[in-house]
Image (tube, rainbow, N blue to C red):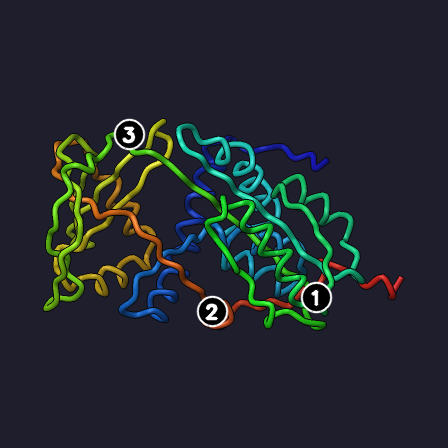
Amino acid sequence: MVAMAMADESSVQKLLIDATNHFTAKMFTEVAKENSGKSVVMSGFSAMSPLAQLGLASVGITHDEILDVIGLPNDNATKEVFSYVSQDVRSVKGVDLKIADRIFLPEDVALNEEFGVVSRDVFHSDIKQVDFVKNFEAAATINSWVEDNTNKRIKDLVDPLTLGADTKAVLVNAIYFKGTWKKKFDSRLTIDRDFHVTKDKTIKVPTMAKSDEFKYGYSQELDAKLLEIFYEGEEASLLIVLPNQIDGLNALQEKLKDPSALEKATEKMYTTKVSVWGLKPYLTPIRLDWKSFFKTLAAVYTLVMLSRRRSSK
């Protein structure tokens, strides 16, 4: 067991929020730049969890740079934040939220015992050994685990051609989220409305309508409107930031590089009656190039302490 004196819950929660906002702002900026003109769906937290494990398994410059990238000051803070995630975030009321972590290692590698305890008790992460030389079998094992932990929503996450004898570890995080709006949209009120693909191009899309009280805000700094829609249980919500200008998305993305800009905008939100037009749900699959992302952030990702070769015993 990992025995840890937890700091005040509110301070740990703030540390988690600040770190997530810090990392997501960096990640979103680079992802949006690499996918200009495309729809992007991403989870900063989903990337933070395996990175935090990697940071705790590293030493020296590698360790310091990884923690700096994810916005956490030291090992103790990292353990406190992810212990809080394990205990509180996983038990959010009113929604179906599953967070799963697993480390896949080569069969001839033994896990550092101390790190194995931290990984299990702090991150609820388990270990699975596979033969990466048999890359198609290894990929099938990983992809099957991901499918099982996302209610079959994410398939073929790992390309077998990316695995081989030189693969030292695969750290995976899977998040499944399903919720029902507290104030439901009536699908019978769906009509086709204009949707701006660009400033000069519109298409008709099925759009639902809802007029009710929501948290709403206007930010002059972001030149945008904000809307928060709660799920059942009121512990989870969707925050929408809509630029005032039809072609204002790029300008908004630039402003969101500073995570405090969004925090300031949300502090001014208030409850009022709002007419909301909602698009029908859709799925956007996307693959991200992490090498490009880390090079941009000047992160070093040399693994030092995660494992040791059995042959070196």
Three-letter amino acid code at the position of disc 1: Phe
Sequence order check: which comes first, mark 2 or mark 1?
1
Residue drawn where x is 58% and y is 68% of the image: 300
Three-letter amino acid code at the position of disc 2: Asp
Sequence order check: which comes first, mark 3 or mark 1?
1
Query: Disc 3, disc 2: CB below 8 Å?
Result: no
Report x, y in % for residue 117: 72, 43
Q: Nearer the viewer, residue 137 or 174?
A: 137
Report x, y in % for residue 7: 55, 33
Left or right of 168: which side holds 194?
A: left
Q: Nearer the viewer, residue 206 or 217?
A: 206
Q: Which residue, given by chain and number where applicable, does mark 1 sit on?
A: 132
Q: Residue 289: which disc?
A: 2
Nearer to us: label 3 or label 2: 3
Residue drawn where x is 56% and y is 37% of the image: 86
The CA span between labels 2 and 1 is 21 Å
Provide the secondary structure element on which disc 2 rests. Answer: loop
Q: Residue 182: which disc?
A: 3
**Mark 2, residues whose alpha carbon is within 10 Å: few (<14), some, or many (≥20)?**
few
Left or right of 151: which side holds 262?
A: left
Sequence order check: which comes first, mark 3 or mark 2?
3
The relative height of residue 214 versus residue 174 in the rendered view (above or below) is: above
Provide the secondary structure element on which disc 1 rests. Answer: loop
Residue drawn where x is 39% and y is 50% of the image: 21
**Mark 3, residues whose alpha carbon is within 10 Å: few (<14), some, or many (≥20)?**
some
Q: Name which quarter of the figure residue 61 lies in.
A: bottom right
The relative height of residue 175 versus residue 231 in the rendered view (above or below) is: below
Query: Disc 2, disc 1: CB below 8 Å?
Result: no
Provide the secondary structure element on which disc 3 rests. Answer: loop
